[in-house]
Amino acid sequence: MSEPIHILYVDDCPFDRELVRDALEKEHCGFRVTEAISRADFEMRLAEGDYDLVLSDFNILGFEGLQVLKTVHSKNPDLPVIIVTGTGSEEVAVEAIKSGAADYVIKTAKHILRLPHTIHAAMKKQQMEDERKRAQEALRYSEAQLSDAMKIAMLGYWEYDVAEDLFTFNDHFYAIFRTSAAHVGGYKLSPARYAELFLHPDDAPIVAAETKKALEASDSQYNRQFEHRIIYADGEIGYIFVRLFIVKDNQGRTIKTYGANQDITERKRSEEALRESESKYRTLVENIPQKIFYKNRDLVYVSCNEKYSNDLGIRPDQIAGKTDYDFFPSKLVDKYRADDKRIMETGLTEEFEEKYLQAGQECLVQTIKTPIRQKDGTIIGILGVSWDITERKRAEAEREKLQAQLNQAQKIESIGRLAGGVAHDFNNILSVIIGYSELAIDRVGMEDPLRKDLKEIYSAAIRSRDITRQLLAFARKETITPEVLDLNTTMKNMINILKKLIGEDIELAWHPGKVPGPVLMDLSQLDQILANLCINARDAIADVGTITIETGTAIIDEHYCSEHAEFIPGEFVLLAVSDDGCGMDLETVDHIFEPFFTTKGVGKGTGLGLSTVYGIIKQNNGFINVYSERGQGTTFRIYLPRHSGDISEKQRPINEEMVNGSGETVLVVEDEMAILKLAERILSHCNYKVLLANSPLEALEVAQSHSGEISLLITDVVMPEMNGRELANRLKKLCPGIKCLFMSGYPAKVIAHRGVLGEDVQFIQKPFSTKSLAAKVRETLEKKTK
Ligand code: ADP
Ligand code: MG
């Protein structure tokens, strides 16, 4: 059973009260009645009790039912009041209802009996009213909440009434646009005015199109979301996000659209900034000259830049899903993947040089690989950057090679200087030994036991002289008399001598080719070159074999020079000597031109052969090259500069017969006393009158004070005070008919260029033998002066 309904019943008439009480209690329908019989009683009981309903007589002594009504409602407006009236007049009823009574009951037996029902109805009505109020309250509350939410979310509400052709906006809507209804002139605006105030002109078509679609939509659930630019009240440009819904009438026409707007300017700005920085990053990745790629944890490509994909012959968007196996030989891939795995395991960035395949061509790249991590640090892949270093590496190797070649050349050069210096001093001493031993031999009788000893001294000195000659040749200090030679003709004459030199077991093949012109060279130097090369070739051939000598033309271009330090470009006369002998390893090839380098046993090789060849060729502005491999034979190629002059018909001056003089006066100038004395001995022995001078100045004095004719000047070339040539010129003024013979072991820079005397100059190389000096003196004296 529910709680009884507690009723406060106000009536001053005992009879009526009895009647009502009967009616309410008789029915047993759950009423509890508290009676008030006077105004004071009523006020007291109303204040004390908690009632569900008040039942009041209309006419109470001293005051009216309507006053009861007022009093009750002033205390609790929701407490229903029913007025009971005896008069039954219509006006009273109307007045009561107007004043807020829940109902009224006429005091007739019939109506009183219905009183419980009336009370229940009033209660019900009140209950409904309460519910309505509660609902209304809830609605008000939720509306307020929505409004707050919209405010927080910066949502603006809008409606568009099609019939009115007007928008209605709320305050938040205006707030978004940084303005207010008061400013704009109310909550309602025409579409045109709205567009004028707030719409970015470029985006008006978006809004127009959306509105059109909404009006034409057939589905009542139709809704849309879209964005467009706006102009804030302060003139700034922004973005809003619009949600749109529609309302249709029962004929299916859209009568209203409504929705919410949200300001998304901030978001748009940061998106734009992000896009911008992303596009900058993209641009960087695409334009950087390096290859960039990204693989996932399974080493499957995720993306790469164009540079990388171009190398692989695909577009960048085709790389995803591929692996290295799709592009590279597995040998390379194994290495790549091992690196990738290690980097993902250690989490460390690594940089290395590695082989790579580009357009089918193996090349070298420098690669940096770095693990890619997600926010929590887990490694999710590999980022690689790599660039081609093939060219750089090649250039480096090239530079190193050239540097090594230069170092080698410089080394040979300095050894040459050293050897040359020693040989020069040595030469003078040897001249003395040779000269005096010759004179001594002439002096002692045939049977004299001393003769044999003297001959030993003589031949040892000659051997030493040969060695010093070679050293001087290597040091380019040997004085030469170059001739203009046709190499093929000259060679033809030499072949037979060379054949004798190498013996019968070895074949000598001679292949003359077309040469671009004559060469300017000392014939004996050419002999030396060929003799040395052929002897070496012979030594390299164990028993039988072939030595091939060829001539031809060689064009040396810039490219070749860039790879060979000592070469200069041009057209050259080529002389090549090849053999099919034992060949050499690289280590040997590196040293062969150094003096005293030999692989031959003691007493067999001097190590001076090739250094002599090298020196001679350098002296003649040529180059030499060697190609050799162990077991594959050897080829020496000599490149000599082409000479533009005529071929000379000079005879080889080999006339060592002692030729005596007929008392001519000869002036000998030499700063080396021993040589001077030797010359005196030889020349007076050969029937010449000999004047001696220890220096050029002394020579001038001697010439001046000498009364008779002086037929010949024999002078050293390098002397203090002035050189031999200068002395000769000055003496020619004193003694007009005088002839000159120069002698030197060390003419270097003094005579002409690179120690080369002019072709018409008479010259004798120190150390000289008695015979050769006598012969040369004769030759000079007999030569016709021009
Ligand atoms: P030598 O002949 O006195 O040893 P060279 O200067 O003539 O001195 O040669 C130096 C070295 O170069 C030789 O000892 C030899 O090892 C090597 N060589 C020279 N020419 C040849 C060749 N044609 N084949 C093989 N090795 C050679
Ligand atoms: Mg040799």
Image: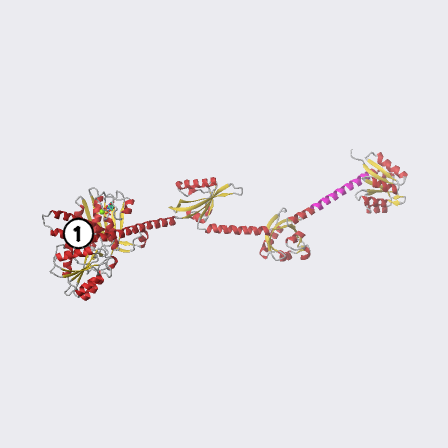
Choose between 575 and 231: the one closer to the eye. 575
Q: Which secondary structure, mark 1? A: helix
Report x, y in % for residue 131: 74, 42
Report x, y in % for residue 118: 82, 40
Report x, y in % for residue 92: 86, 46
Is 705 positioned to the left or the right of 250 in the image? left
Give the quadrant of residue 667.
Answer: bottom left
Looking at the rendering, in which quadrant would you find the N terminus? top right
Choose between 294 and 407: the one closer to the eye. 407
Magenta stretch: includes residue 123: yes
Where are the magenta residues, as a range? 117-142
What's the residue at 44%, 51% (across, down)? Answer: 289
In this figure, which residue is indicated by the disc labeled 1? 434
Is 376 positioned to the left or the right of 289 in the image? right
Q: Main secondary structure of the magenta part?
A: helix
The residue type indicated by label 1 comes to Ile
Q: Is residue 571 above or below residue 706?
A: above
Can you see residue 765?
no
Report x, y in % for residue 328: 40, 43
Magenta stretch: includes residue 120: yes
